[in-house]
Image (spheres, rainbow, N blue to C red):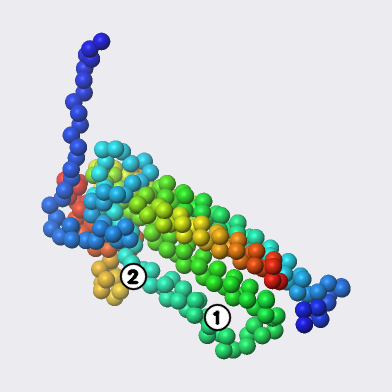
């Protein structure tokens, strides 16, 4: 039977913004500012939806846990000079050091996962803020681009100014009144992208 | 030294061994939770590094199991 009505095919949106300098950023999966990432998929993504920006916290925010991990890794070697564990038998001493390294590994891996998977995504239709608050608790806030009412960029402090990162606060008319992109690289550029997507 | 400290006729090191093994069992459970967490994270956002991250999660779990086995053998 012939079709009575055939909906016209929706043309694929190839949203390229006219903002200068967006293409020059790294396309590594570890990048904190990723423009038009083709290899990224996320939960609930429509087939016609295109990711414009993929953001995570600036890499410099990892410096705290990286320094702490190095200190924790070096601690057994440094503390071996002092006879702190000398009251323990040799086999218990070995297991104590092994457990120490195991806990250090867990701390470093958890900190890395926390940075790597807490992401902010701007598509041509929606914005997403994905937060993993602890081991198994996930929070995803989303709002449509046309529900964005106001975008505020918050930058302050020496480190943030030097490394050019800050918070982008997005007021929305959706169920989630405010979405916050925390410590993202080049917040002014992110705000510019959002502004361009809204018009 | 190992059998010199006794509490109610039980070596103190035996008690310590039991506590160490219990702590390691809890750690193994934690490493399984981490594997579950990685699965959940990769379902949420997929950045093309699935294999590497899954591998680190499983290596961490095997490391914990290895330490547990070594603790049983040498303590």
Location of the C terminus of chain B by quadrant is bottom right
Residue, x 29% and y 54% (percent of image)? Answer: A54
Indicate whether A146 appears above or below A27.
above
Indicate whether B42 appears above or below A158.
above
Residue farthest along the top direction in this orientation: A1
Examine the rendering and report whether any part of residue A51 can be seen: yes
Q: Nearer the viewer, residue A123 or A34?
A: A34
Mark 2 on the same chain as mark 1:
yes
Examine the rendering and report whether any part of residue A133 can be seen: no
Residue, x 33% and y 70% (percent of image)? Answer: A60
| Chain under numbered label 1 | A
Picture quadrant of residue A63: bottom left
Q: Is residue A192 left or right of residue A75?
A: left
Residue A176, percent from left and from top: 37, 46
Q: Nearer the viewer, mark 2 or mark 1?
A: 1
Q: Secondary structure at mark 1?
A: helix
Decide which of tag 2 and tag 1 comes sooner along the chain: 2
Label 1 near label 2: C-beta < 8 Å? no
Residue, x 59% and y 72% (percent of image)? Answer: A98
Residue A3, percent from left and from top: 23, 15
Residue, x 51% and y 54% (percent of image)? Answer: B35
Circle 2 sits on which residue?
Answer: A60
The disc label shown at residue A76, or none = 1
Location of the N terminus of chain B by quadrant is bottom right
Indicate whether B39 appears above or below A68.
above
Q: Is residue B60 left or right of residue A35?
A: right
| Chain under numbered label 2 | A
């Amino acid at each position: 039977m012939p079709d009575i009505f055939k909906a016209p095919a929706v043309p694929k949106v190839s949203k390229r913004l006219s903002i200068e300098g967006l293409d020059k950023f790294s396309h590594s999966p570890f990048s904190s500012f990723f423009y038009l990432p083709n290899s990224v998929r996320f939960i609930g993504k429509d087939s016609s939806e295109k990711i414009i920006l993929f953001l995570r916290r600036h890499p410099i925010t990892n410096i705290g846990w990286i320094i702490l991990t190095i200190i924790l890794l070096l601690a057994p070697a440094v503390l071996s000079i002092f006879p702190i564990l000398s009251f323990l038998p040799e086999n218990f001493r070995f297991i104590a050091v092994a457990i120490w390294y195991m806990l250090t590994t867990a701390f470093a891996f958890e900190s890395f996962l926390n940075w790597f998977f807490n992401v902010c995504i701007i598509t041509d239709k929606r914005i997403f803020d994905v937060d993993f608050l602890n081991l198994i608790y996930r929070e995803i806030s989303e709002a449509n681009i046309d529900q964005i009412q106001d975008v505020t960029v918050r930058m302050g402090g020496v480190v943030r100014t030097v490394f050019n990162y800050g918070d982008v606060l997005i007021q929305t008319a959706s169920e989630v009144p405010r979405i916050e992109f925390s410590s993202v690289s080049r917040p002014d550029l992110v705000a510019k992208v959002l502004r361009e997507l809204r018009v | 030294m190992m059998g010199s400290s006794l509490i109610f006729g039980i070596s103190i090191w035996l008690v310590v061994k039991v506590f160490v093994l219990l702590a390691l069992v809890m750690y193994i459970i934690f490493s399984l939770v981490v594997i579950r967490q990685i699965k959940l994270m990769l379902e949420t956002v997929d950045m093309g590094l699935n294999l590497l991250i899954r591998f680190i999660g499983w290596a961490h779990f095997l490391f914990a199991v290895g330490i547990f086995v070594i603790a049983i053998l040498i303590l």
